[in-house]
Image: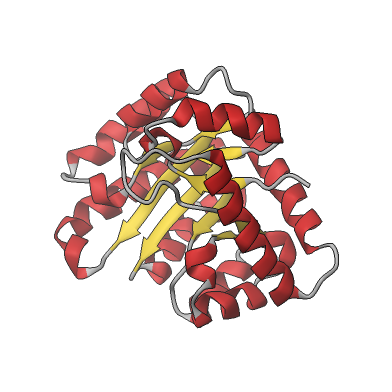
Amino acid sequence: MALHDMHCHLDFMANAEEVAHEAHNAGSLLFANTVTPEGWQSAGERFAPYENVVTGFGLHPWWVEADEDAARAASLLREHQPRVIGEVGLDLSRRHSQTASAQRAAFRAILEWAAAKGGRLVSIHSVHAAGEALDALESTGAAESCACIFHWFTGPSDQLKRAVQMGCYFSFGPRALATGKGREYVKAVPVDRLLLETDYPPKQGDACSFGELEAELASAAEDVAAIKKTPDALEVIEETSRRLLAIGV
């Protein structure tokens, strides 16, 4: 059974095309998240030959710098009409709190566009902002009209429950599953809302073999199967991954 990476940064890999090619040969799908609209445009061109790679329109909160970023993102969304969004979201930790206002404006602008269009796939970064991110998904209507994935959800348990009730999906990798909280959250999420991820590469510009990605995914899959104790858990995850990424095809 093929394992699919539902959150990686393929464009950050020094040997991205090689990884994409090897993943294709292995039958693995890659959800390549980007961090800026310009990065999305470049990655889209690079990975166009690989039908197993789905590239998301990104505006990662770490790369949001000014209030003008919201208007720029909205303009590019209207121009290019992407079907897949990611990585976007909020990071309100102390290190990034100085751009909180600009982050909120950008995230909301993206969600409003996605909700109005409907049928979009959205991968969300949320640090110290789970409740606020969910409020934005709810108030814009994106939670209802789009398929929304929380990448490595670390919010409080009451917000996890709320996200599940709102129909969100959750991608987990080995680093999340190495924590007690991550394992408890996998246990709490319905198996048909679970996805696997690597968040690779470890550092921008690293070379990374597909074998490394595959090992990370296999490790996560093994842990999830052990936690869920459901015979067909991995088959369900595989089917969910294919269904969601078909949005971008």
Left or right: residue 148 versus residue 95 is right
Q: Residue at x 51, y 44 (%)?
A: 115
Q: Residue at x 34, y 34 (%)?
A: 74
Which quarter of the rendering shows the C terminus?
A: top right
Q: Pinpoint residue 211: horizontal percent, then vertical percent.
A: 57, 44
Left or right: residue 149 versus residue 139 is right
Question: Can residue 70 be spotted in the picture?
Answer: yes
Q: Quadrant of residue 78?
A: top left
Closest to the observer, 201 or 233: 201
- Image height of 125 relative to 175, above or below: above
Closest to the observer, 34 or 49: 49
Q: Pinpoint residue 154: horizontal percent, then vertical percent.
A: 44, 71
Q: Pinpoint residue 148: horizontal percent, then vertical percent.
A: 55, 52
Q: Quadrant of residue 79?
A: top left
Q: Pinpoint residue 69: horizontal percent, then vertical percent.
A: 23, 39
Q: Residue at x 29, y 54 (%)?
A: 104
Question: Can residue 120 be spotted in the picture?
Answer: no
Closest to the observer, 122 or 173: 173
